[in-house]
Image (spheres, rainbow, N blue to C red):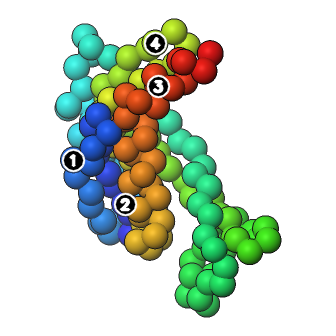
């Protein structure tokens, strides 16, 4: 299986790789790499799995349909939606009230195509961006 591995720090992408391998084995290797970079005196080491919804405009090709259908593909109006598993490994973070600010993370997900890859890159930048947490705090 092709996998996407992203390393993001402070709103910037430091590394982006597409690799072949068994998902769990690759994920565990990335967690080990994060463990080596983690400073226990500064932050928590957190690994979280969630489903990331991806939206694509219709029409899509037969090849796209076959790939996206593996990830709970559904249609709504002139768009299609599907969910991919995304693992966030945060190795430098801080708590601000009830919010956590991740400043250094790895993200591991299946590699679907370049469009989905760019959406995951955006996610990585947003997660590690200081602006996002400041906006959340201002809203409260």
- 87 left or right of 125? right
Discs 4/3, front: 3
Question: Does residue 50 show up?
Answer: yes
Up/down of 137 relative to 50, above or below = above
Q: Quadrant of residue 120?
A: bottom left
Discs 3/2, front: 3
* Local SS, label 2: strand
Residue at the image point whose x is 55% and y is 13% from the top:
98
Query: Which one is earlier in the sequence, the residue at label 2 or at label 4?
Result: 2
Residue 3, image x and y in percent?
38, 63
User: Label 1: few (<14), some or many (≥20) within 10 Å?
Assistant: few
Residue in front for this viewpoint, 57 or 53: 57
Query: Which one is earlier in the sequence, the residue at label 1 or at label 2?
Result: 2
Query: Which one is earlier in the sequence, the residue at label 1 or at label 4?
Result: 1
Q: What residue sits right under mark 4 in the picture?
A: 96
Mark 3 to mark 1: distance in Å?
20 Å
Q: What residue sits right under mark 1 in the picture?
A: 14
User: Label 4: few (<14), some or many (≥20) within 10 Å?
Assistant: few
Q: Which mark is residue 4?
A: 2
Up/down of 108 relative to 75, above or below = above
Residue 59, image x and y in percent?
66, 84
Up/down of 123 relative to 102, above or below = below
Q: What residue sits right under mark 3 in the picture?
A: 133
Discs 1/2, front: 1
Figure quadrant of the N terminus? bottom left
Mark 1 to mark 4: distance in Å?
24 Å
Residue at the image point whose x is 42% and y is 24% from the top:
101
Mark 1 to mark 2: distance in Å?
14 Å
């Amino acid at each position: 299986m092709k996998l996407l591995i992203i390393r993001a720090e402070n709103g910037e992408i430091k590394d982006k790789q597409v690799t072949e391998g068994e998902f769990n084995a690759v994920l565990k290797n990335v967690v080990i790499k994060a463990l080596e970079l983690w400073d226990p005196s500064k932050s928590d080491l957190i690994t979280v799995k969630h489903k990331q919804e991806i939206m694509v405009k219709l029409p899509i090709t037969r090849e796209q349909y076959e790939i996206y259908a593996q990830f709970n593909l559904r249609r709504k109006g002139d768009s299609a939606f599907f969910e991919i598993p995304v693992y966030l490994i945060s190795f430098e973070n801080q708590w601000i009230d009830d919010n956590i600010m991740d400043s250094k993370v790895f993200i591991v997900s299946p590699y679907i195509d370049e469009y989905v890859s760019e959406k995951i890159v955006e996610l990585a930048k947003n997660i590690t961006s200081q602006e996002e947490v400041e906006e959340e705090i201002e809203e409260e």
